[in-house]
Amino acid sequence: MATAIIGTGGLGSVIARLLAAGGETLRLSSADPEPARTLAAQLGPTAVAAAGNRDAVEGADAVILALRFSVLKGVIDELAGPLAGQVVVVPSNPVTLDAHGNVVRVLPDGQSSGKVVAGWLPAGAHLAMAFGSMSASLLESASNRSPEPAVLFYVTDDDRAGAEAGRLIRTAGFEPVKAGGTGQSGRLEVGGDLHDLV
């Protein structure tokens, strides 16, 4: 199985390290190609830096869009053709920092980021919201906990996306737990009742 990870910043690089440690083959891409090349070299032969986002998606069994919410729609629009029929996993939280450094939502209260992202995806794409319910540092430290694995929550309305999200979550060293459909994505986000729970 091969997974494309678009975005190799703080969260994307942690997800890549956890999946690579679990044996997943990865195709990495980022806006600046150098971080993807550096990360692929660190991860070894199971990871390659793709020539770009479209190249990363080609031949992948799933695509993780590990991007800031503010750039997510633009990348989805760029990849609309290749994402049709594809399993798409989105960890993004709809938040940003205001002028005072405070975390603020970029969507109106009560609006589900999962529903918004589902509306951006092309017809036939299979969406799961996963890997965004923990900060990058907690995600990394909680992986492969023993004797009982930490739980990682996900939401989806799609059986195929749910099966693939569950497989990826297990590969990353967690026990997957479905927390509802995409309309429940707010529970996983910063400020949600399931955020940063293990």
Image (cartoon, rainbow, N blue to C red):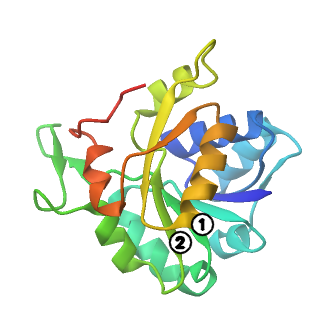
Three-letter residue code for mark 1: Arg
60 relative position to 163: left or right: right
Count all numbered tags in the image, as a single digit: 2
Q: Residues within 10 Å of mark 1 (few under 14, many from 20)?
A: some
Mark 1 or mark 2, earlier in chain: 2
Q: Quadrant of residue 74?
A: bottom left
- Please determine whether, in this image, residue 31 is positioned above or below residue 102: below
70 relative position to 72: left or right: left
Observer-nearest of 149 and 110: 149
Observer-nearest of 150 and 7: 150
- Where residue 66 appears, as percent x and y from the top left, is 50, 53
Q: Quadrant of residue 108?
A: bottom left
Residue 126, which numbered label?
2
128 relative position to 109: left or right: right
- Where residue 31 appears, as percent x and y from the top left, is 55, 62
Q: Residues within 10 Å of mark 2 (few under 14, many from 20)?
A: many
Q: Which residue is mark 1?
A: 160
Observer-nearest of 179 and 103: 179
Residue contact at pointers 1 and 2, CB within 8 angstroms: yes
Q: Residue at x 67, y 51 (%)?
A: 36
Q: Secondary structure at mark 1?
A: helix
- Where residue 47 appears, as percent x and y from the top left, is 80, 49
Screen quadrant of the N terminus = bottom right
- Please determine whether, in this image, residue 9 is positioned above or below residue 159: above
Observer-nearest of 190 and 149: 149
